[in-house]
Amino acid sequence: MTVPRAVFRYIEHELYNYKETKKEIQELREDIQEGMSVPLKEAVPGRGYISDPTSRKAMKLLTSKALKKMVGNVTAIDRALNRLNDDHRQLFVLKYQHALHWKKVCSEMPVSDRTYFRLRRELVLMVAAEMGLLAEVGKGE
């Protein structure tokens, strides 16, 4: 199966930025939890308003679109890595986390050029499938 070029590039971008995305998720969650200075006020008939900052924080965490997208992408990458073998995980670390050139990755693993490109394609395909970008990938396995 071939992956459209735009999808392949998007997946590789997400793989390269995996650590940064995880850090951003944590920072966003902390900002949401700590940054709520204005309490949510709920009307109570005959008594005025009551404050519920916990509810407000929970709602913000649940409704943040950027946070939801980042968490979904990180989760998809984690699931794909768990489904693949050690060679794929090693390739992920060397290529996408250490940003090594493909020839350096081949010598570090050690694998042939052809094996490197096959592993890379399989990794991207699995992440794309986990993200729902290629629904038919993995159904025949």
Image (cartoon, helix red, strand yellow):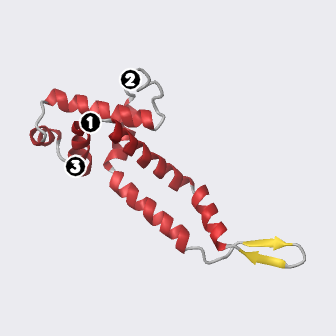
Q: Amino acid at mark 1?
A: Asn
Q: Amino acid at mark 3?
A: Ala
Of the pair 118 and 78, the residue shown nearer to us? 78
**Identity of the residue drawn at 24% across and 28% down:** 118
**Residue assigned mark 2:** 141
**Residue assigned mark 1:** 85
Quarter where residue 58 is shown: bottom right
**Identity of the residue drawn at 48% across and 47% down:** 72
Of the pair 97 and 10, the residue shown nearer to us? 97
- Classify residue 88 as left or right of residue 23: left
Dots 1, 3 in contact, CB < 8 A: no
Dots 1, 2 in contact, CB < 8 A: no
Local crowd size for mark 2, using a 10 Å CA cut-off: few (<14), some (14–19), many (≥20): few
- Classify residue 103 as left or right of residue 10: left
- Classify residue 84 as left or right of residue 52: left
The percent position of residue 26, horizontal first and vertical second, equals 44, 63
How far is mark 1 from mark 2, CA to CA?
A: 14 Å
**Identity of the residue drawn at 57% across and 57% down:** 64
Tell me the quarter of the image containing the C terminus.
Answer: top left
Local crowd size for mark 3, using a 10 Å CA cut-off: few (<14), some (14–19), many (≥20): few
Counting residues from the start of the chain, the first of labels 1 and 3 encountered is: 1
- Classify residue 82 as left or right of residue 110: right
Counting residues from the start of the chain, the first of labels 1 and 2 encountered is: 1
Marker disc for residue 99: 3
The percent position of residue 28, horizontal first and vertical second, equals 48, 64
**Identity of the residue drawn at 35% across and 51% down:** 18
